[in-house]
Image (spheres, rainbow, N blue to C red):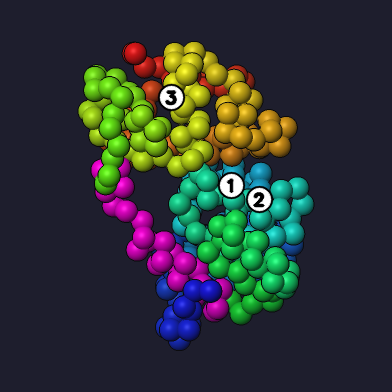
Amino acid sequence: MPDTGDIIERLEPGTGVGLRVCVVDDDEDLRDEVVLGLQASGFSVRGFPGSRELYRGLLHTPCDVVILDIGLPGEDGFSITASLKEVSSCGVVLLTSMTSVESRLKGLMDGADAYLIKPVDLRELAATVLSVHRRIATRRPEAGEEAGAGMPSITQTSATWSMSIDGWVLIAPNDLGVSLSGSERLFLTCLFRHLNEVVRREVLVEAMGHRPDYYLSHRLDMLVSRLRKKVLHETGVALPLRAVRGLGFSLTCVR
């Protein structure tokens, strides 16, 4: 549980200015109450009824912290938490009526940064969001720091893209490296095996260890969007990753 006590006393209008929050709950009244309450403290807040709407929203505008109900129709909050932690660096606060220790442990083991029980005082929720964001911000490396520290040997050095021997670092043509998450590593490894070819979405999803009939398309798009932004930010070079509508993706590099 985040250290919210010292923050609660200092909450006032404008506290959350600049912090982007998404609220996911299929209870429209409760969702609206949380959205309006956080907006009153200055947070920039968007509400969604489920995972599909959330993933679609994050493709266009990222956020800093996601507040999730667990008992959602379709994909539940546990699964969404695990997915978000695979493809983004946002914080996750589970807000649920599930009070069992087993549910709390599962949520935290799946990657949630905090677990709150409904009903919750909006001041405590706002304080938790602030605390989660503060902890994530302090452990997030500066641009280039993560990629440069302890970088393994490179398979090749040339005017093209490559991956390190163990596949955990993507090397840009200017020799700057980008550390990859597990999903990014599997995704790019599959594309490098089929360089300059269009790889179908279902093939990429299976390469990442998921069933194509379960892994939502929006998740893959979200991973690609974040990967492109991360590579450009850390290397200054755009990743030559092309989306082919209705088919999949192609990595166009010179061997």
- Earlier in the chain: of badge 3 and badge 1, it is 1
User: Distance of mark 2 from mark 3, alpha carbons?
Assistant: 27 Å
Near mark 2 (Cα within 10 A), the count class, few <14, some 14-19 or many ≥20, is some
At a point 63% along the width and 51% down the height, the residue shown is 80
User: Distance of mark 3 from mark 1, alpha carbons?
Assistant: 22 Å
Residue type, numbered disc 1: Ser
Residue for badge 1: 83
41 is higher (above) or lower (below) than 149: below
Asked where in the image residue 181 lies, by quadrant, the reply is top left
Q: Is 234 in the magenta?
A: no
192 is higher (above) or lower (below) than 217: above
Residue type, numbered disc 2: Ser
- Earlier in the chain: of badge 2 and badge 3, it is 2
User: Distance of mark 1 from mark 2, alpha carbons?
Assistant: 6 Å
Which contiguous range is marked in magenta? Answer: 123-148
Q: Position of residue 4 (x, y in %)?
A: 48, 79
At a point 61% along the width and 23% down the height, the residue shown is 203
138 is higher (above) or lower (below) than 118: above
Q: Is 139 in the magenta?
A: yes
Residue for badge 3: 241
155 is higher (above) or lower (below) than 37: above
Residue type, numbered disc 3: Leu
Callout 1–callout 2 Cβ contact below 8 Å: yes
Near mark 1 (Cα within 10 A), the count class, few <14, some 14-19 or many ≥20, is some
Kindly report which numbered mark, 3 or 1, lies closer to the viewer in this rendering.
1
Q: Residue 79 shows which numbered tag?
A: 2
Left or right for 250, reference 55 = left
Q: Nearer the viewer, residue 40 or 225?
A: 225
Q: Is mark 1 on a helix, strand or loop?
A: helix
Q: Is mark 3 on a helix, strand or loop?
A: strand
Callout 2–callout 3 Cβ contact below 8 Å: no
